[in-house]
Image: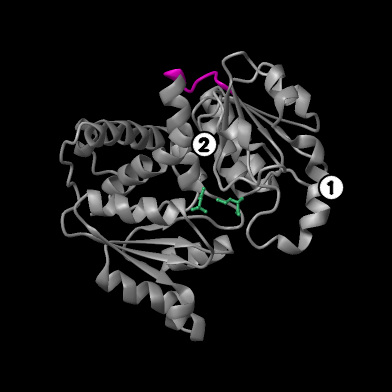
Amino acid sequence: MANLATTALKGRHFLRVADWKSDELTVTLDLADELKALLTRGAPHRLLPGRSLALIFNKPSTRTRVSFEVGICQLGGTGVSITAEHTHLARGETLKDTACVLSRYVDAIVIRTVAQSEVDELANHSSVPVINALTDSSHPCQALADVMTIRERFGQLKGVRLAYLGDGNNVCSSLMVAAAKLGMSFVGAFPDGFEPTEQAQADAREAAAESGGSVEITRSPEQAAAGADVLYTDVWVSMGQEAERDLRLAALEAYRIDEHILALAGPEALVMHCLPAHYGEEISEEIVHGPRSAVWDQTENRLHAQKALMALVLR
Ligand code: CP
Ligand code: NVA
């Protein structure tokens, strides 16, 4: 495993995609492919014997939590899942003190929470790597698995046209920046007011200028889908946005991935969704379980991509 010779990433936080260089992302994807192959043929790969991981979840999770817990176990380590409400965080202990405490026990901290600033605060005071497992504004671990899946299917990322339709949310923002860094052609179709943040757009445009990729934003789902190699969507109501449900569904109705949109994309175009899906809203169950879907590989690749990430950043 040539990639393991690299020590450059030891101790690094993974807080947002924009913080990592394209070659650092590529090293992670290469190792993820290797770890996937090893697991598939039942070969041992206990790269982190005796290491431990704290997992703080302030929002629900199925995939992220399970893939991190299983992943650290397969690497020879142990994961400790913490629900904030059962810790002193819920009683006012600061993130700073929590970071100092956990740094004395574990080799890395995974956190899913509301504000990106909470992840940054934890990282500022942690002496072990902090991994962002989703905030309101980003989901970098999802983006890693997504580009891994696209590269696996197309053999490359440069020039692959990725169309994202719907809400320019956390998943979209991280994916857009990752795609731009890796030379992809990203096109997002969003209703007025649902675009990714200015910061995410600026990060993506800067990355695309360096990589030779491109970033385009349109109001037209048809224009985005035309000739796309990958069609991607996510839920219209993210965790914490439940009060805006009616408004969001009405605004996003025209951005559904359906048979009409599929027909506009390339004949071999893949469909992706980070899950959980809300069938009848952004996509149908038939499409997610249909022949064009890469969703189940995408969800599996969360495990391999995060194992690679842990193997590279944990000391
Ligand atoms: N895609 C994703 O992050 O899923 P979970 O919310 O189940 O972790
Ligand atoms: N955008 C969704 C992603 C879930 C993995 C949310 O934040 O709820």
In the image, 198 versus 191, the foreground residue is: 191
Residue 243, picture quadrant: bottom right
Residue at 45% x, 41% y: name it. 299
Which amino acid does the dot numbered 1 rest on? Ala
Q: Is mark 1 within 8 Å of ligand 2?
A: no
Q: Residues within 10 Å of mark 1 (few under 14, many from 20)?
A: few
Q: Is residue 95 left or right of residue 277?
A: left
Residue at 56% x, 24% y: name it. 292
Task: List the residue tagged with mark 1.
Answer: 250
x then y, percent, for residue 51:
21, 59
Q: Is residue 98 left or right of residue 137?
A: left
x then y, percent, for residue 288:
58, 34
Answer whether residue 157 is magenta in the image.
yes
x then y, percent, for residue 124:
43, 65
Q: Is residue 279 above or below residue 51?
A: above
Task: List the residue tagged with mark 2.
Answer: 178
Where does the C terminus fall, quadrant-wise? bottom left
Foreground mark, 1 or 2, reads 1
In the image, 181 versus 271, the foreground residue is: 271
Q: Name the residue at the bottom extreme.
A: 91
x then y, percent, for residue 2:
20, 31
Name the secondary structure under disc 2: helix
Residue at 82% x, 55% y: name it. 246
Which amino acid does the dot numbered 2 rest on? Ala
Question: Which is the main secondary structure of the residues drawn in magenta?
Answer: loop
Q: Is residue 32 above or below residue 135?
A: above
Answer whether residue 1 is magenta in the image.
no
Q: Which residues are magenta?
A: 154-161
Q: Is residue 52 above or below residue 170?
A: below
Residue at 37% x, 50% y: name it. 67
